[in-house]
Image (tube, rainbow, N blue to C red):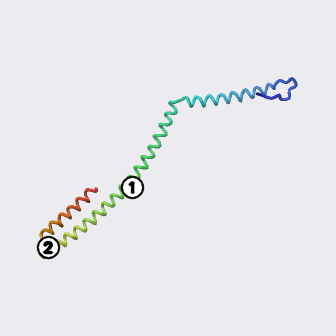
Amino acid sequence: MSENNGTTDGKPDLVALRAEIQRTRADLGETVQALAAKADVKARAREQVTQTRQRLLEQAAFATGRLREVAGHATANVKDAAGQTASASEGAAHDVAVRVREGRVPMVLIAAGVAAVVGVILIVRGRR
């Protein structure tokens, strides 16, 4: 427990004993506080809920940002495809109109062309 601090009668020094008692009390107080913190299940559960909530909010914010980015790219791609399809169909329609006026295109080909244009338009609109 304590040593003989040079006293002649073999008894420990009273000051040294009191200092050791103070250290022991401080250690015991810290140990009691640590045990009380571990025993407080409600506080630990609240802390876990708070940490989980924070982590989920961060993940949701990241996912929302990523989704907006992907949606922006997809919208741009659809607009580009629609513009290309519209210009291609306009060009095809013009060519067909010229040939029809000149009488060089059979009616079956005209119907197939119109069906193809309508199909492309429906496909492009279906992607939106």
Label 1 element class: helix
Residue sitting at x 80%, y 29%: 3
Q: Residue 109 got which mark?
A: none
Give the farthest residue toward the front.
108
The CA distance from mark 2 to mark 1 is 47 Å
Q: Is residue 17 above or below residue 57?
A: above
**Image coords of residue 107 (percent x, y):** 12, 69
Q: Is residue 24 above or below residue 60?
A: above
The residue labelled by disc 1 is: 69
Quadrant housing residue 2: top right
**Image coords of residue 26 (percent x, y):** 68, 29
Q: Nearer the viewer, residue 119 or 51?
A: 119
Q: Is residue 70 above or below residue 43?
A: below
Q: Is residue 15 left or right of residue 50?
A: right
Q: Residues within 10 Å of mark 2 (few under 14, many from 20)?
A: some
* Amino acid carrying mark 2 in the image: Val
Pointer 2 or 1: first along the chain: 1
Residue sitting at x 42%, y 46%: 60
* Quadrant of the image containing the C terminus: bottom left
Label 2 element class: loop
**Image coords of residue 75 (percent x, y):** 33, 58
* Quadrant of the image containing the N terminus: top right
* Amino acid carrying mark 1 in the image: Glu
**Image coords of residue 67 (percent x, y):** 38, 52
Q: Residue 105 got which mark?
A: 2
Residue sitting at x 62%, y 28%: 32
Give the farthest residue toward the right.
8
